[in-house]
Amino acid sequence: MDTESHLHIARRFIEAIPHSKALGMEVEEIANGKAVISMPFDPRLIGDPETGVIHGGAVSALMDTCCGAAVMSHPDGAIATATIDLRIDYMRPATPGQRIRARAECYHVTRSVAFVRATALDEDDSRPVAAATGAFTFQRQGGA
């Protein structure tokens, strides 16, 4: 499958999830089990009014969606996926006002499970906001 097809699949995948659209998520890159999805800063998503820091739940949603997109773009051809388990370690608050970007890689696939790792970053690429590892269902066409 070529890059354009992967991008089309990922966009359809994200557009089918109402909260992804509501959060303003955008696919930046997608290919061969890797995805980059970003989300703009939105004052409606602030979790701490005193600091202006975005709520961890919005970061979780971004990372989960990016991981799913990475699974959907894997060369082994997933036609559907769902989160089985996702562990997120928050390392620091995202800088208020900055776009947050998640990068995910589907690094191993079994017959029915895909394993993914991801990082969330703001404009400071040297200091991650969060890191995640997860397991996702991997449904192939025909169920095989």
Image (cartoon, rainbow, N blue to C red):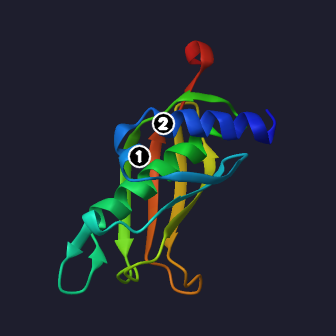
The amino acid type found where label 2 is placed reads: Glu
**Residue 100 seen in the figure:** yes
Quadrant of the frame with the N terminus: top right
Give the numbered dot on residue 15: 2
Residue under the point 37% across and 65% down? 88
Report how many numbered discs are placed on residues in the image: 2
Q: Report the side of 54 relative to 98 (left or right).
A: left
Q: Is residue 70 above or below residue 76?
A: below
Give the labeled residue for mark 1: 20
Residue under the point 55% across and 33% down? 12
Give the quadrant of residue 123: bottom right
Residue 18 location (% of width, % of height): 36, 38
Residue 132 location (% of width, % of height): 44, 64
52 vs 121, nearest the viewer: 52
The amino acid type found where label 1 is placed reads: Ser
Q: Report the side of 19 relative to 135 (left or right).
A: left
Q: Is residue 140 above or below residue 36?
A: above
Residue 121 location (% of width, % of height): 51, 74
Mark 2: which secondary structure? helix
The CA span between labels 2 and 1 is 7 Å
Label 2 CA crowd tier, 10 Å (few <14, some 14–19, many 20+):
some
70 vs 52, nearest the viewer: 52
Residue 51 location (% of width, % of height): 24, 86
Tell me which label, 2 or 1, sits earlier in the chain: 2
Q: Are marks 2 and 1 in contact (CB under 8 Å)?
A: yes
Residue situated furthest right in the rendering: 2
Residue under the point 61% across and 18% down? 141
Residue under the point 58% across and 31% down? 111
58 vs 106, nearest the viewer: 58
Quadrant of the frame with the C terminus: top right
Mark 1: which secondary structure? helix
Give the quadrant of residue 17: top left
